[in-house]
Image: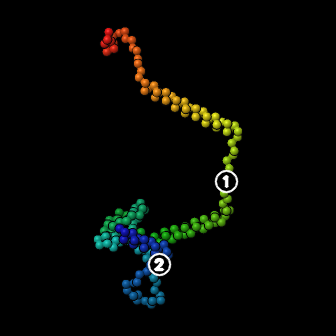
Amino acid sequence: MKALGLVFCALFSVFASGQTFSPAPLQAPASDASTTQPPSYANYSIMLANPAPGGGAVVLMHNPKNAIEFVPVNSTKQAFDAGYVAVRAGELDALIGALRDENARLSAEVERLHAQAPAAQVVAIAPAAPSQGEIAERQSEAMETERAVRRQQLIQAWGMLNASRPQTFNVNVTNCTRSPALCVGR
């Protein structure tokens, strides 16, 4: 799979750099060498091959919903029958060219905006000094909060002191039918 990605990256870098890729022709052309045109690969389909033994290959295709899919080479006939169309090298080249143009346009826009905007000035706004009334109000709120915290601590301490002392309860039972256990000594 890594090799498959490397093949695609190499293909992408050739298109992105704007260079043309033209391998040596298999046969020498019959006509004069000065009049021959370099071969055009715009109509070629894009296939990514895995160089590992038995790695297989995939073809880049548009599905009927116009989404791009990788189709295994052995399934291309069924894909064509299902309405798939192979992505051509010319389409990929046009896409990369459009992206390159859009990037150049956006870079120029950024440069223009940077040139238009004056140097950024940092303005620090100091917070307004609180008035005497606000200071007094904050102090009274702080004191009230502190009083409430101390009051809660005292209540908790009182509860702890009382919980540790043994307590005696005097219970007077007049009806032993309801609570016979309390009437044992009578």
Q: Nearer the viewer, residue 100 or 87?
A: 100
- For residue 122, above or below residue 3: above
For residue 11, side relative to residue 142 (left or right): left
Q: Which label number is shown at residue 62?
A: none
Callout 1 amino acid: Ala
Residue type at mark 2 is: Thr
Question: Closer to the camera, 17 or 170?
Answer: 170
Q: Secondary structure at mark 1?
A: loop
Q: Is residue 77 visible to the viewer in this orientation of the structure?
A: no
Name the residue that disc number 2 marks.
Answer: 20
Q: Secondary structure at mark 2?
A: loop
Residues 62 and 157: in front is 157
Pointer 2: residues within 10 angstroms few (<14), some, or many (20+)? few
Q: Which mark is residue 124?
A: 1
Q: Residue furthest right?
A: 132
Percent from the top left, x then y, of residue 56? 31, 70
Labels 1 & 2 near each other (Cβ < 8 A)? no
Residue in view at x 64 percent, y 37 percent: 139
- Nearer the viewer's eye, disc 1 or disc 2? 1
The residue shown at (67%, 62%) is: 119
Q: Residue furthest bottom?
A: 32
Residue 113 point in image, percent of width and height: 63, 64
- Quadrant position of residue 87: bottom left
Label 1, residues with CA under 10 Å away: few <14, some 14-19, many ≥20: few
Q: Report the residue at 32% width, 66% height from top.
A: 75
* Image vertical order of residue 95 relative to residue 24, above or below: above
